[in-house]
Structures are given as structure tokens and as C-alpha cells.
Amino acid sequence: MNKSSVILAITVIICAICFREQLLQAQSQEVTGDSEVLREFRGEIARGMDIVERKRQVAAIETAFSRYTIQERARQLAHLCYEKTLGTLFMPMDLAEIALAETGGHGLSAKAVSVKGALGVWQLMPFRAKSHGYSPNEMVNDEKCADAAVRELSIKLQMARGNISKAKKLYCGIGPDADAYELKQRQFRMEIMRVLDNAVTKRREITHKLMAQSS
């Protein structure tokens, strides 16, 4: 069993122990309906699962990005997708597919400039960058560009009344260009999803192999 498998097994055991202790504590309280402890613990589990899923996406995003740029840059941009979407309604994949749709064809370059003047990996128009507190020149900074992109996407989410898919389409605009952009986004999302599916398959194969060896 390799080091990663051992760490995973230990983590699962610790989570199981913590869950049992918290559950026993909640059950010991004689209250009507869910106890405060149980509700709090459910929230912790949900937050934990959210973080796990976000980190799982980061690995797939890095793999997808590495097809368009060098490995180190792919890693840095993937982690930005994670960091900048924490505490938001967006997942790393949402920010990643926008980056690929916007500048995947340009090597995810920070210096990319569209014919309309959009800037950076996430292609913010100068006036939109300013509305989010950044100068146009700052869009060559990946971190600032990613931050501005999430802020812009949040505004689009309000316009879309909470529909994230529509918000991502509105990120481009409206009309035929936005329709083509939405199609491109979905294609890149499918690309990342395939990487995720392959990772799941590999983990299952490793698990089955370890179980076979231990039997």
C-alpha cells in the first residue's frame, strides 16, 4: 500500500470516529427534532464535502490546463480557480472553463488581448476591470484578473437570478457570440469532467487491486 493510500485510510478512520462521537453526543440530548450539535455537525460535514470536491476539481483542472500551457503555469492557474472561488457559490470548474473558453486558444496567456480590448486570462474589458477596483494594466496579473473575473461573474449571477449556467453565458454578453461562447464553455467543461471520470476509474482500480492483494 503506497503512502497516499495509507493517508487516505487513516483520514477515513478518523472521520468515522469523529462522526460516531458527535452522533452519540447528539443522540444523548433529549430534545425534540435535531439537536444543535447534530445540526452543526451536519453543516461541518457539508462544508468538508464541499472542500473535498473543490480540491478534486483542482487536480482535473490542472491536467486540462496543462494541455494548453506549461505544467507549472497550469498548476498555478488551477490553484487560483480554487482560491478565488472559496466562499462563493462558484466551483473551481466554473472559473476554469471560462479561462479555457476565453484564452485556451492563446495558451492561457496573461498578456492575451482580444480584438475588442478584453484583457488577461479571463478577458476583462478595461471598464469592467476598473469597476472591480483594478486598472486595465493589472489584468496581466493572474491573481487580480481571477479576482475581477469572480466579481464580474457574481454580478452576472444576480442578473441571471441565481442561474450559474446563464451567468457564465452572460459573462461573454448576449447574442450569437454569447451562444457560440456558451457552446465552447460546455465543451471545455466536458473536457474537465472526462479527466475527473478517469481519475475516479483509476482510484477504483487501485482500490480493487489493494483489496485483492489483502485477501
Image: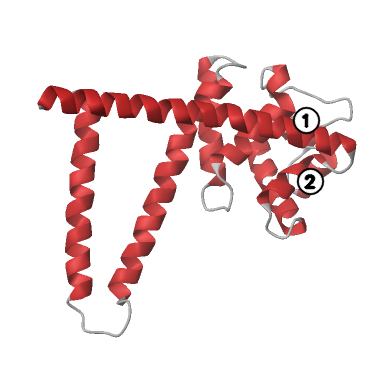
How does the figure colour the protein chain or chains? secondary structure
In the image, is 110 to the left or to the right of 197? Answer: right
Residue 118 locus on image (x, y percent): 82, 32
Q: Determine whether label 1 and label 2 are within 8 Å by CB.
A: no
Residue with the mark numbered 2: 170
- Is 97 situated above or below 213? below
Q: Quadrant of residue 209?
A: top left
Q: Nearer the viewer, residue 49 or 134?
A: 49
Question: Who's the residue at 41% across and 55% down the image?
Answer: 47
Residue 99 locus on image (x, y percent): 67, 31
Looking at the figure, which quarter contains the C terminus? Answer: top left
Residue 49 locus on image (x, y percent): 39, 49
Which is in the foreground here, disc 1 or disc 2?
2
Residue with the mark numbered 1: 119
Q: Is residue 119 visible?
A: yes
Q: Is residue 141 visible?
A: no
Q: Secondary structure at mark 2?
A: helix
- Is 148 situated above or below 120? below
Dot 1 or dot 2: first in sequence order is 1
